[in-house]
Amino acid sequence: MLLKSIVFFLFLFASFAEAEDALRVVSLSPCLTELVFHLGKGNLLVGRTSACDYPEDAKKVEVVGGFGKPSLEKLLTLKPDVVIASALADPALVSSIKRFGIDFHLLPTKSIEDYYVSVATLGKILHCEKKAFAEIARVGKGLRRFAKLNAEKGFKRPSVYLEIWDRPYMTVGKKSFINDLITYAGGENIAGKLNQAYFNCSVELIITSDPEVIICPAMKTGREADVESRRGWKRISAVREHRVYVDLNDDLIYRLGPRILEGVELLRSLIMNKTAATPSPSVDVENPTAVPSAMFRHCSNGFQYGRETFSSKVYLGIHRSLQDICSLRISDGC
Amino acid sequence: MVVDGAALLFMKENIKTYWILVLALIALPALFALCVSAGGTLLNPLELFGGESISRDLLEQRFFRVLTAFTVGGALAVSGVAYQSVLRNPLAEPFILGISGGASVGAAIAIGTGLAAFSCAVIPLSSFCGALLVLTLVMILAKGAGDEYSTNVMLSGVVAGSVCSSALMFMISVMDVETLHSVTWWMLGSLQPENSELLYLVLCLSVLGTALLFVFGRDADMLSFGEETAFHFGISPKTSALIILGTASLLTASAVTLSGIIGFVGLVVPHTLRRFFGAGHRRLFPISFLAGGMFLMLCDTFARTALYPREIPVGVITAALGGPFFIWLINRKGTVSR
């Protein structure tokens, strides 16, 4: 009898310890939810936002609130070990979450480089550094392919106006990763020189910049005509040549997640619709001369970027991918 | 303010109405040309009549934007004058009374339910219903307050305004993304011209409304002395008040349809004008229309040029000017009307 109960308690303890072992993760951002599933750790996810709708399996996870604005009570009832977010509606929430002993990570999404940092950080948190490394290599390789195409001789970048919102007009500037996506896709963002992320832009900027392509990802089908009939827009090249594109799968463009290569491909197919450039693999990218390795600091257990530390191997992956970006920037003359 | 207004009415009665003509024929076209020529780059407004060119496109675009600003500013200022006279409260203004809020909720419901797709008259109509509903509600809430009526109207207006903005927030939080975008700008206010049919409709309504109020100008004068006095002067206070308030709400609703909520225009403009032209409403209504339009034209020109190529919401500019003015008005009221 005694033996039986001891065995029972041991068994109970063991199963408890096993349950303890599985990390409980809540994602407060659709792009991070996609990334967690992409890294094969979707089973660890116990909470998501109502905006997290990809992949299909993500919809089975419980909802803790809207994008960046979770209900704290709902969050706590799920007993997460880790909460990851890319933006928060209320920054004060961070201290509330941390007060309950939950590990909180706010991952950056300002530029395409930030994606590597997100992947590496998640790889570390979710113990899948190998997969993270492979993902960084995959995206880096994909972007390098686009950079190669753009670096061809005689290639001229068509100017692009990307409309986030139509009333008032809102577009992206230099500080948004979407500007990077347009650049990789072979376009030149008309607001790309402005030191802004997302901003209300003057209609005069759009008319005087004379974009060759207009992209309105969130606008519904059939509204191209509305755009073309806007007052004073009839002389814009994109309107004259009917190169206004609406109703795209905007999740590919607006989410800095594992589908960004598809996003760049989508943008490229629109931008290159007419001036199609044929890929020629013989052209090589110039060698990078400067790499922002200064972004990383060497520390006792690897490399540090901001407050995150990475193992040397992951660092090398990021470093390689950053080299790719630098080579793009250099060959672009940026 | 009642005493102040009456004193001004008699003091400045001699000011000739030709000031209206001066405003309408010289100052307005000059300012209009100035606002059209200002922008990202300074352009010659006469190029608008020239051949096809980028400058012509820009000027055409600016022309309609300035016309929108003029229409909205005029309508808001005139309705401000009307509310102030009938409600006998110097702080009455479509934005503060919650009428703009009611109009925007009406419009948002039309957009949210998809009714707006049927005809371009649906949004103005539903925002007019919203405005009337809030006005009625405010009047009923303030009823039975006796001597405190004037204050209570304002307080219920403020309450109605915040209830309307929470209703908008609620709709934003439950609607899908595409619809949400078209409702959010309603709260910010924007003079970006969208639909020229709507602009012409609202311009006609504003001019007709101002004309109707001009006809009822004497009644407005009498009503601002109090309903009993008005009755003894020989007018029917209930009927006149209803007509004036109804017209003012129609003006507000049509302005909101075109531009979303823009505050304080109906406060700054009428009070400034009273100092120069007296409180006689037959003069005040047309002048307010012209001056209100000019005021918003200037504010909007500043909003779109100051940080070019970024744009500041025009409501920010009017609130920055109107807020301090409002405070000054409250303090002044205590000393003058005693």
Image (cartoon, coloured by chain):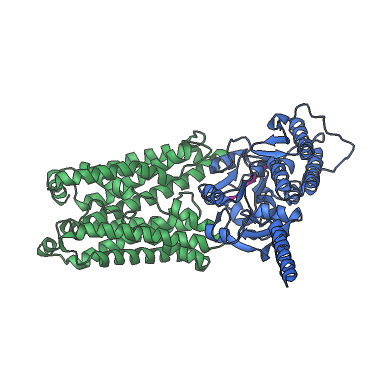
Chain colours: A blue, B green
Q: Which percent across, then down, holds residue B146?
A: 16, 63
Q: In which quarter of the image is residue A208?
A: top right
- Residue B13 visible in the displayed image: no
- Residue B263 visible in the displayed image: yes
Q: Which percent across, then down, holds residue B168?
A: 44, 60
In this image, A329 relative to B297: left or right?
right
Residue extending farthest bottom: A1
Q: Main secondary structure of the magenta part?
A: strand
Query: Along the line of sight, which residue is nearer the eye, A312 or B213?
Result: A312
Q: What segment carries the magenta color?
A: A159-164
Q: Quadrant of residue A299?
A: top right
Q: Which percent across, then down, holds residue B30?
A: 37, 38
Identify the residue at image location x=73%, y=52%: A259
Residue extending farthest top: A289
Residue extending farthest right: A282
Identify the residue at image location x=56%, y=47%: A170
